[in-house]
């Protein structure tokens, strides 16, 4: 959702409003978040803030688009789309999500809050936005993978769905393992081994034997 007045603000004031709102919404959720506190932490009056953002709902939906735009831009800039093996591409994605969590922890915290928001005022629009983002992302991420690697007789479309669902679970588990840790505190070798163990199982389930 575009908020033209907010978009046209000088960077310092715009960032102050966005950062204050991200923190408040992530900490308290949509319903309990206080616009008074957001304005105070941004260093402006509540009246002036609403001059820029129209309403609490508009601000929340704007932040959802803002957060996903930054995360996905970084994400797609890092994925090697020349890799045609779907499982190898998925492995990249799992580790990239972990790296981006460290790079943008505040954005990820807000997006998680938005995903689990059930408040009627915003839920329908969030669900639609989420579905649109997922469809566009998956279509781009898994474009032109090498289907010849799959076992004969498989319903490849369903196999891809199962791999994607597994990927989401693997990536979420890895993110929870590293959340709040510094890079020096992460046992990267252990995470890599655990991640690879899941992808080895997926390879055995869905891919033809390389010797065939």
Image (spheres, rainbow, N blue to C red):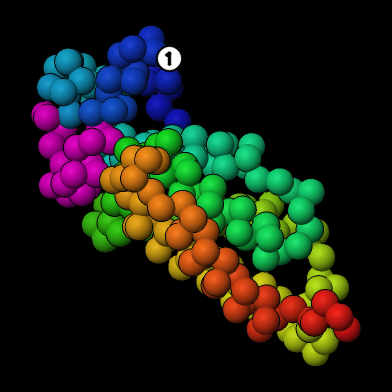
Q: In which quarter of the image is residue 25?
A: top left
Disc 1 crowd rating (10 Å Cα; few below 14, some 14-19, many 20+) is few
- Return the x and y of residue 86 as percentages of the image width and height: 71, 64
Q: Is residue 54 above or below residue 196?
A: above
- Return the x and y of residue 126 as percentages of the image width and height: 39, 53
Q: Is residue 122 above or below residue 53?
A: below
Q: Which residue is drawn at 58% across and 54% down?
A: 93
Q: In which quarter of the image is the C terminus?
A: bottom right
In the image, is 120 to the left or to the right of 206? Answer: left
Q: Which residue is drawn at 38% across and 18% down?
A: 5
The residue tagged 1 is 8
- Return the x and y of residue 27 as percentages of the image width and height: 18, 44
Q: Main secondary structure of the magenta part?
A: helix
Magenta segment boundaries in residue numbering: 21-37
The extreme top residue here reads 10
Q: Which residue is drawn at 16% across and 42% down?
A: 33
Is residue 44 magenta-colored? no
Is residue 31 magenta-colored? yes
């Amino acid at each position: 959702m575009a908020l033209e007045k907010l978009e046209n603000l000088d960077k310092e004031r715009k960032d102050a409003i966005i950062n204050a709102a991200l923190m408040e919404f992530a900490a308290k959720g949509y319903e309990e978040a206080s616009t008074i506190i957001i304005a105070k932490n941004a260093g402006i009056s509540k009246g002036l803030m609403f001059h820029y953002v129209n309403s609490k709902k508009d601000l929340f939906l704007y932040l959802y688009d803002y957060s996903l735009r930054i995360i996905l831009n970084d994400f797609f800039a890092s994925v090697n789309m020349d890799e045609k093996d779907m499982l190898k591409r998925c492995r990249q994605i799992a580790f990239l999500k972990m790296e981006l969590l460290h790079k943008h922890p505040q954005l990820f915290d807000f997006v998680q809050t938005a995903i689990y928001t059930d408040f009627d005022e915003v839920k329908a629009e969030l669900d639609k936005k989420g579905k649109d983002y997922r469809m566009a992302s998956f279509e781009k991420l898994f474009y032109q993978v090498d289907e010849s690697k799959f076992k004969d007789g498989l319903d490849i479309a369903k196999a891809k769905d199962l791999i994607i669902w597994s990927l989401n679970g693997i990536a979420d588990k890895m993110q929870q393992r590293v959340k709040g840790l510094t890079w020096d505190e992460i046992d990267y070798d252990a995470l890599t081994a655990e991640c690879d163990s899941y992808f080895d199982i997926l390879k055995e389930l869905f891919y033809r034997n390389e010797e065939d």
